[in-house]
């Protein structure tokens, strides 16, 4: 009984996976699951005085937050509040993923800085 030579087959599979974006780096950015991006603040009475408020205008190109921040976003006459308890693996995502449908007319990147209270101390 002979064992077929499988290395050429594996090379072809690896090449196909790389071309399709399945291996290692992908050609398109991957959007994190919404459950990794924090949570909406439903009860506005729970928002503490002094929490951040960011007005989304046509000039807004991106938003910077720190993991753990609670931010009220105002876009025209609409608003929503989001608590950025994000996964440590999330550094950026689009605000449109968490905004109410139709609130934002374009994609706005959110850049998340890790919370310094939970640093590794290294």
Image (spheres, rainbow, N blue to C red):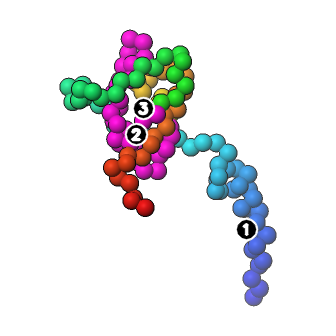
Whether residue 31 is situated above or below residue 51 in the rendered picture: below
Marks 1 and 2, how far apart in space? 43 Å
Q: Earlier in the sequence, mark 1 or mark 2?
A: 1
Between 20 and 47, the one nearer to me in the picture: 47
Would residue 29 appear left or right of 81 to someone viewing this image?
right
- Residue under label 2: 66
Q: Earlier in the sequence, mark 3 or mark 2?
A: 2
The mark total stands at 3
Q: Which percent across, then down, holds residue 79?
A: 36, 19
Would residue 17 appear left or right of 80 to someone viewing this image?
right
Between 113 and 76, the one nearer to me in the picture: 113
Q: Residue at x 38, y 54 (%)?
A: 119
Q: Residue at x 60, y 42 (%)?
A: 29
- Residue under label 1: 10
Whether residue 89 is situated above or below residue 110 in the rendered picture: below
Highlighted range, magenta: 64-93
Q: Which mark is residue 80?
A: none
Q: Do the numbered discs 1 and 3 sit on residues whose CB atoms are within 8 Å? A: no
Q: Which percent across, then down, holds residue 50?
A: 27, 27
Marks 3 and 2, how far apart in space? 16 Å
The local crowd at label 2, few if under 14, some if 14 to 19, many if 20 or more residues have their Cα within 10 Å, is some
Would residue 90 appear left or right of 70 to someone viewing this image?
right
Q: Do the numbered discs 3 and 2 sit on residues whose CB atoms are within 8 Å? A: no
Q: Residue at x 43, y 61 (%)?
A: 122
Q: Nearer the viewer, mark 1 or mark 2?
A: 2
Marks 1 and 3, how far apart in space? 40 Å
- Please identify the quarter of the rendering in which residue 43 is found: top left
- Residue under label 3: 98
Instruction: Label 3: state its secondary structure.
Output: loop
Instruction: Label 1: state its secondary structure.
Output: helix
Q: Nearer the viewer, mark 1 or mark 3?
A: 3
């Amino acid at each position: 009984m002979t064992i077929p030579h499988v290395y050429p087959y594996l090379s072809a599979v690896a090449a196909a996976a790389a071309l399709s974006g399945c291996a290692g780096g992908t050609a398109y950015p991957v959007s994190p699951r919404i459950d990794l991006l924090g949570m909406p603040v439903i009860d506005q009475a729970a928002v503490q005085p002094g929490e951040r408020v960011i007005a989304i205008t046509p000039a807004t190109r991106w938003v910077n937050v720190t993991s753990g921040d609670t931010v009220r976003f105002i876009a025209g006459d609409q608003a929503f509040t989001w608590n950025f308890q994000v996964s440590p693996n999330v550094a950026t995502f689009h605000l449109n993923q968490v905004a109410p449908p139709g609130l934002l007319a374009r994609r706005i990147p959110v850049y998340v800085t890790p919370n310094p209270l939970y640093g590794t101390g290294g």
